[in-house]
Amino acid sequence: MTAAPTPGQTVGPFFGYALPFDGDSELVPLGRPDAVRLTGRVLDGAGEGVPDAIIELWQLAPDGSVPRAEGSFQRDGYTFTGWGRASTDRTGRYSFTTLRPGGPAPYFGLTIFARGLLHRLFTRAYLPGAAPAGLRSLDAEADDRGFVFDIRLQGEGETVFLSYTHDAVPL
Amino acid sequence: MTETQGDISAEIEAISKEYDASGTVEHGVRLDYPPYRSSILRHPTKAPFQLDPEELELWAPVFGQRDVDPLEADLTIQHRGEPVGERMTVTGRVTDGEGRPVRHQLVEIWQANAGGRYIHQRDQHPAPLDPNFTGMGRCLTDGDGTYRFTTIKPGPYPWRNHQNAWRPAHIHFSLFGTEFTQRLITQMYFPGDPLFALDPIYQAIVDPAARDRLVATYDHDLTTPEWATGYRWDIVLTGSHRTPVEGDVE
């Protein structure tokens, strides 16, 4: 028997003292030679930056394996846990320091939370050119430090958000 | 901000009537719920793109003893003195839709103090801060999927959705499943709160049975004599179709 899921609620405006932690957005230390940056802005339906969003990243290691190591809250500089968290700044910008994901069509898995957003959103930021047909709009752009991927919650150029077919109960 | 509670309540009621007449059942929260004013420019207008999860999304990040100190589950011992308010135990199980426990996984909570004030800089309403209460805790579920926190009961607080808007008392919960797709942030409420009917965030779950799933149960068996009251709240995550394999944390 399938039990009914617990509904979501907004992360609200006051997560700033609870969810962020030291090194949250630095999956690897700044300055590591193979470090890349994933950055972008979260924008609302009026094109304004969303200053109270928090983005989580989950990705494969460069060799294509799924990270199974603990230690995200206590970064030791060597362990790659594949997971991080970045709050947006006053202009709606988020930024991660990480490694290039591996795999056949490499992407960063992203979860978006914000005040005013009643339930989390999922999307993928593919490495440039890696997105399959039908999801081309989810290709990140390259810049000199890594990749740029804006998240538009609403309106023109609205980001394609994802739901997974195995969710037994539609939400 | 000239809209009154009456205006907002009328909108809530109209949506509720429309839902009742639709004959459908919605299990989750609506993203597009205009009575919650901040959602108006922040909800997607297109339906999500459905796809099969890749291998990455069939796994969740791992948190362990290295990440979380067991003392972080007690929000009443983070300062030199005792926080003001009703001390309570909050516990329950995290399972997936098939009833399988989510074992050894991270649970994070945050909340206002007994006076309804968050320590967050942006909460400036004139209720006192409590020097002995931060209002943030973490724990890992045990081998049965059970989490357990000691904290104090948060107060309701005013916000600026409309004139004289008050949020029902709640604790924010952040949950990870065994798969990326199960990620959930939500809020736990307390039974019988008179603010439920007035609150556009709680009412954004239009189905009454689904709303009830966010309300904890008072459980006298969880109380500690002359020390703490007790509330139970179980959490069910969606999905999880990966066949468990050897190497999964037991």
Image: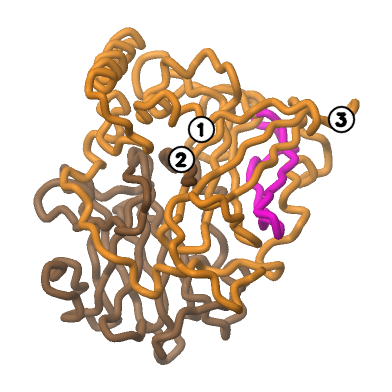
Q: Which residues are magenta?
A: B129-153
* Chain given the colour orange: B
Q: Is residue B139 magenta?
A: yes
Q: Which chain is brown?
A: A
Q: Quadrant of residue B21?
A: top left
Tell me, for residue B213, which label it has, or none: 1
Identify the amino acid type marked 2.
Ala
Name which residue type carries label 1.
Arg
Q: Nearer the viewer, mark 1 or mark 2?
A: 2
Mark 3 — residue?
Answer: B227
Of all residues, the one furthest to the front in this rendering is A1
Q: Position of residue B214 (x, y in %)?
A: 52, 32
Asked if marks 3 and 2 fall on the same chain, the answer is no
Residue A134 lies in magenta, yes or no?
A: no
Residue bearing mark 2: A4
Q: Nearer the viewer, mark 3 or mark 2?
A: 2
Helix, strand or loop at label 1? It is loop
Q: Are marks 1 and 2 in contact (CB under 8 Å)?
A: yes
Q: Nearer the viewer, residue B234 or B68?
A: B234
